């Protein structure tokens, strides 16, 4: 595959001449504890009862998609699947339904990553909206088919709210990088 | 920052597409199997037990708050409760003498008829642990599980009557499907005339319904439905609901009655799970299909 590319390049490496044209995509590397820590926190927050109101944003999905975009070496489809399965058990839904949606969302972002990383967060938002709508539509259709009842469109609001939080998350997540002065890590 | 040790020239593992297909197949298989069979129960239980410590951790502040709240209001709460209980006691005194008389008379009649003695049931008090945010079903998760003797199939009641039925248990939690949930069916009878029926969860929000009502069935608006005790899971005589309306369909010859449940699972946090003896229910019964 053509996108087999080095994730980090040392100047001492003989491969330094293979520096990517656009370095912005690689400028923002988060330490692993931030990635896993935020995912764990958001997952635990999702266990709280505030999600009973259907239109609230799915923060877990938001963070999963965000890390799929920015930390593809750490967070990918498998992570999305595992977290989806955990939420399925917590929500007492059909096993694998939410996992299916999360995997599709993660794949959508994975597919668009090279394109997304060149845009500012607001434009990224416009790309991510259809990805999340489609990804969430599939489990809802499947659930409706298997359980014999359409659960309404409340989830669409949830997706809209989730996507609306994207630029905010982008700003928050780029704060620590800016402070540590690590490269040109402005709003990508 | 980039270190030589972290240098990875190629993505490791299978390509994205391969992983996508694998995970899609896996999740689809899980969904379909879980929708039709119960073979995934051990997996669900294992995950459930694994996430239980996290659930307890995040709920801890709320529990602490509740504790503090009840502690700070304890004096006024106790006074109010005491008043209510005093009033109830006066009302109950009359009823209980009457009931004792009836019990004696009933036992005598049962002996005369040779009917099996109704056994007193053990009950387990449970508290709502959380309400799962699931749009497809109406469930409650309680804070006690198989460690406290709860088993799938046991009925859950509150002061209004039947609330639902336990459908899944883990060692520390149990999941109850409410009366209004699709998966529940309860053998009931009309209090007025003893007509036996089966009540199901309804498409209408917060309602239960009696389907396949024969055209000539003697059911009226305002009739009370109580459990009939047939099937062995639900004890007889618990109130279930009140008939709101009856829709008769001359095309099919069958009607359906819509009833409102008399229990209020959304109002309280404490419920009673009634124990059922292992031997009494027929073995072919599954939880959630108790009446079929």
Image (cartoon, coloured by chain):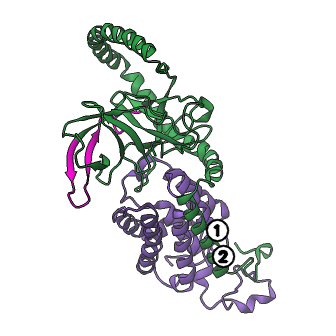
Please name the residue that numbered disc 1 is placed on: A78
Q: Which chain is purple?
A: A
Binning the other alpha carbons within 10 Å of mark 1 as few (below 14), some (14 to 19) or many (20 upward) gives some
| Magenta-colored span | B244-270
Please name the residue that numbered disc 2 is placed on: B19
On the rendered structure, is A31 left or right of A59?
A: right
Q: Position of residue B249 (x, y in %)?
A: 21, 57
**Does B269 appear in magenta?**
yes
Q: Which chain is green?
A: B
Whether residue A178 appears in this view of the structure is no
- Tell me the subunit letter for badge 1: A
* As drawn, B49 above or below A127: above
Q: Tell me the residue at 38%/32% (across/down).
A: B228
Q: Tell me the residue at 51%/51% (across/down).
A: A92
Whether residue B292 appears in this view of the structure is yes
Q: Do the residues bearing badges 2 and 1 touch, measured as CB atoms within 8 Å? A: yes
From the viewer's side, name the closer residue of B288 and B230: B230
Secondary structure type for disc 2: helix
From the viewer's side, name the closer residue of B97 and A79: B97
Binning the other alpha carbons within 10 Å of mark 2 as few (below 14), some (14 to 19) or many (20 upward) gives some
Q: Position of residue A29 (x, y in %)?
A: 63, 72
Q: Position of residue A174 (x, y in %)?
A: 53, 69
The quadrant holding residue B164 is top left
């Amino acid at each position: 595959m053509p996108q087999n590319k080095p994730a980090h390049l040392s100047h001492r490496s003989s491969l330094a001449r293979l520096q990517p044209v656009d370095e912005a995509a690689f400028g923002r590397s988060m330490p692993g504890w931030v990635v896993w820590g935020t995912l764990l926190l958001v997952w635990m927050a999702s266990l709280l009862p505030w999600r009973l109101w259907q239109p609230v944003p799915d923060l877990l999905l938001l963070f999963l998609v965000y890390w799929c975009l920015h930390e593809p070496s750490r967070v990918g489809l498998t992570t999305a699947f595992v977290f989806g399965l955990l939420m399925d058990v917590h929500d007492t839904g059909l096993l694998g339904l939410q996992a299916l949606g999360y995997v599709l969302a993660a794949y959508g972002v994975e597919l668009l990553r090279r394109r997304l990383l060149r845009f500012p967060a607001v434009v990224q938002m416009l790309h991510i909206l259809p990805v999340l709508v489609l990804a969430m539509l599939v489990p809802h259709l499947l659930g409706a088919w298997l359980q014999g009842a359409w659960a309404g469109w409340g989830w669409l609001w949830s997706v809209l709210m989730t996507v609306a939080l994207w630029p905010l998350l982008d700003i928050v997540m780029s704060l620590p990088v800016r402070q540590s002065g690590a490269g040109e890590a402005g709003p990508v | 920052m980039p270190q030589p040790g972290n240098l990875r020239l190629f993505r490791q593992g299978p390509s994205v597409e391969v992983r996508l297909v694998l995970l899609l197949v896996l999740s689809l298989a899980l969904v379909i199997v879980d929708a039709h069979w119960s073979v995934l129960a051990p997996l669900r239980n294992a995950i459930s037990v694994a996430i239980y410590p996290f659930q307890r951790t995040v709920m801890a502040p709320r529990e602490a708050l509740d504790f503090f709240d009840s502690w700070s209001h304890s004096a006024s709460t106790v006074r109010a409760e005491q008043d209510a209980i005093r009033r109830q006691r006066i009302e109950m005194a009359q009823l209980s003498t009457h009931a004792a008389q009836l019990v004696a008379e009933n036992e005598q009649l049962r002996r005369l008829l040779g009917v099996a003695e109704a056994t007193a049931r053990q009950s387990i008090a449970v508290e709502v642990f959380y309400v799962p945010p699931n749009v497809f079903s109406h469930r409650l998760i309680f804070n006690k599980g198989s460690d406290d003797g709860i088993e799938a199939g046991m009925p859950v009641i509150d002061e209004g009557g039947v609330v639902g039925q336990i459908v899944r248990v883990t060692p520390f939690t149990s999941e109850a499907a409410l009366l209004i949930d699709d998966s529940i069916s309860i053998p009931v009878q009309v209090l007025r005339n003893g007509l036996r029926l089966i009540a199901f969860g309804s498409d209408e929000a917060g309602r239960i319904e009696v389907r396949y009502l024969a055209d000539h069935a003697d059911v009226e608006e305002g009739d009370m439905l109580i459990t009939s005790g047939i099937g062995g899971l639900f004890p007889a005589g618990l109130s279930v609901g009140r008939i709101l309306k009856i829709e008769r369909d001359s095309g099919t010859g069958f009607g359906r009655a819509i009833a409102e449940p008399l229990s209020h699972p959304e109002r309280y946090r404490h419920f009673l799970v009634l124990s059922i003896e292992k031997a009494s229910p027929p073995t072919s019964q599954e939880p959630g299909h108790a009446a079929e």
